[in-house]
Image (tube, rainbow, N blue to C red):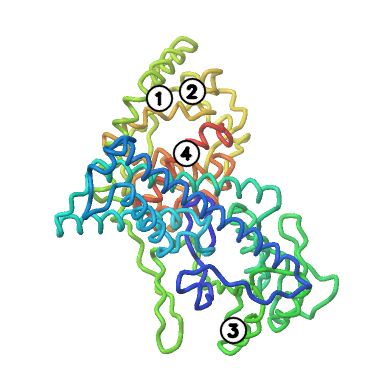
Amino acid sequence: MVDGGDGVTASRYLEVETEAERDGEDPPLRLVNESSPQHNSRSRWQHCYVSRLRIVDTVVVAGAVAVAQVARFGTTPEAVTAGTISGFSYTMTSVMLGGLWLAMLAIHRTRSTRVIGAGAEEYRRITTATFQLFGVIGILSLLFQGDLARGYLAIAFPLGLIGLLGGRWSVRKMVARKRAKGDCYTSVLVVGGRRSVLTMTRNFERESASGYRVVGVCVPGSGYLDDEHIVVDGREIPVLGNEYAVVDALAECGADTVVVTATEQLGHDGIRSLVWDLEPSNVDLVVAPGVVDVAGPRLVMRPVAGFPLIHVEKPRYHGAKSFGKVAFDMCFALAALILIAPVMLAAAIAVKATSRGPILYRSERIGLDGKPFPMLKFRTMVDGADKQVADLLGRNEGAGVLFKMKDDPRITPVGKFLRKYSLDELPQFVNVLRGEMSVVGPRPPLRREVEAYDGTVRRRMLVKPGLTGLWQVSGRSDLSWDETVRLDLSYVENWSMMQDMLIVGKTVRAVTAGSGAY
């Protein structure tokens, strides 16, 4: 699994799993090459990670059922034994519920090394396991007329679910901090052409939270030289041979995982032989099918005639226009406007008191299906700033067709503060209520930007532009034009409600940090 940083990227690789992993168990400890100390290192930190998750899950579940019991029945022995279910006291019921809850988490493989730290998939499994458990309990209580207190379940269910998700989030943050220091990563040997190696290495470096780090490459057709290497963003990575030297390369670089992009050069027999060669060691084999920026739900693997064929489902553009997303946008925007009303009032007073001109600035943007609309913002520049653009084009620091300046002379002192923390964009919740924008979506473009679009970039307008999006939580103005387009297109083609919620959560962190905004 590879986490797309924005947490929101999903699996794009086909992992060759053992029978134990397919059955939902953690990978067994296998023979490890003593010359590859990183194998042992990875096993240690993954084992510690999973053990810590077990402790956190147990504490959260036990705490949730205990709080539910105390809140519903109190602490006196008479209160606890008064409500009984088929002869069981509620203390026994709490113990059984906690055991079943932990069992459901194990059945759904929420602690599998294939998903821990993998963003939405890890959270999805926890949520599915919890909903299924309480759904089954509710159905059984109805069918057998069990006298199970609804208030007890109503407290345990949300408390436990929030606690489990929060526990996973806190443990992931701890590991992310260690990875930022160079610890807790999976070392990778990439087998593929130079162009594929460069692309994959850059992606792994950009998404450092995924924990993958390329330590060596095998290039098909290469004449292996001791001093041969490739350079990626200033880092030298040794070339350790061709596609048939993988085992020897592993002994030299000590990688934990082999990522194969050269499937055509290796062929069916070559990949099968590689699987057999790696079987005695604690090394994972990952096959990259060459499909990029496609989320996991759109990838379905079906074995046909002995071949593991990956079916890529069509993009779900219309899903982003569904009732569920519209309802979420309306409810979220209305609640946000009520909560931030004092902040908006203070911003409006500051804008009006410190510079001449209107409080709000109406910027024409191009929305869904190419239709223009007036996007609302607090004015952050001097009045008439649009007329000065032509004189400043020579100092443009923006990427691609974007016009950006880090030290734009048109920005007022108050406007600079509002922009840093994105407070100038708060009036756009009104655009959301008017149906012109969505809470999450591609960046709303200007008309002159759209006129410069090619056919590929125009696909951004297949959904409503958003107040925030992947571009907002992945660097904001610091992103290159190509990276901005890639993130927007990735969102358009892989939209989901879970992704929207994760982006909203990350937006709060990005705005608070104030980085990449000018």
In this image, 78 relative to 254: left or right?
A: left
Q: Amino acid at mark 3?
A: Ile
In the image, farthest residue toward the top: 353
Q: Which residue is mark 4?
A: 507
Instruction: Name the image quarter holding residue 417.
Output: top right
- Reading the image, the residue beneath label 2 is 380
Q: Residue at x 46, y 51 (%)?
A: 58
Q: Amino acid at mark 4?
A: Thr
Mark toward the start of the polypeptide (2 vs 3): 3
Q: Residue tagged by mark 1? A: 361
Callout 1: few (<14), some (14-19), or many (20+) C-alpha neighbours within 10 Å?
some
Q: Secondary structure at mark 2?
A: loop
Q: Secondary structure at mark 3?
A: helix
Report the Cα–Cα distance between label 2 and label 3: 58 Å
The residue positioned 42% from the left and 30% from the top of the image is: 425
Distance from disc 1 to disc 4, alpha carbons, whole Å, reads 23 Å
Dot 1: element: strand
The Cα atoms of the two marked residues, 2 and 4, are separated by: 21 Å
Q: Are marks 1 and 4 in contact (CB under 8 Å)?
A: no
- Residue 70 is at least partly visible in this image: yes
Between the residue at mark 1 and the residue at mark 2, the CA separation in whole angstroms equals 8 Å
Kind of residue at disc 2: Thr
* Closer to the camera in the image, 366 or 198: 198
Q: CA distance from mark 3 to mark 4?
A: 42 Å
In the rendered structure, which disc, 1 or 4, sits on the residue that comes first in sequence? Answer: 1
- In the rendered structure, which disc, 1 or 2, sits on the residue that comes first in sequence? 1
Label 4 crowding class (10 Å Cα cut-off): few <14, some 14-19, many 20+? many
The answer to whether 517 is drawn above or below residue 401 in the figure is above
- Looking at the image, residue 156 lies above or below residue 230: above
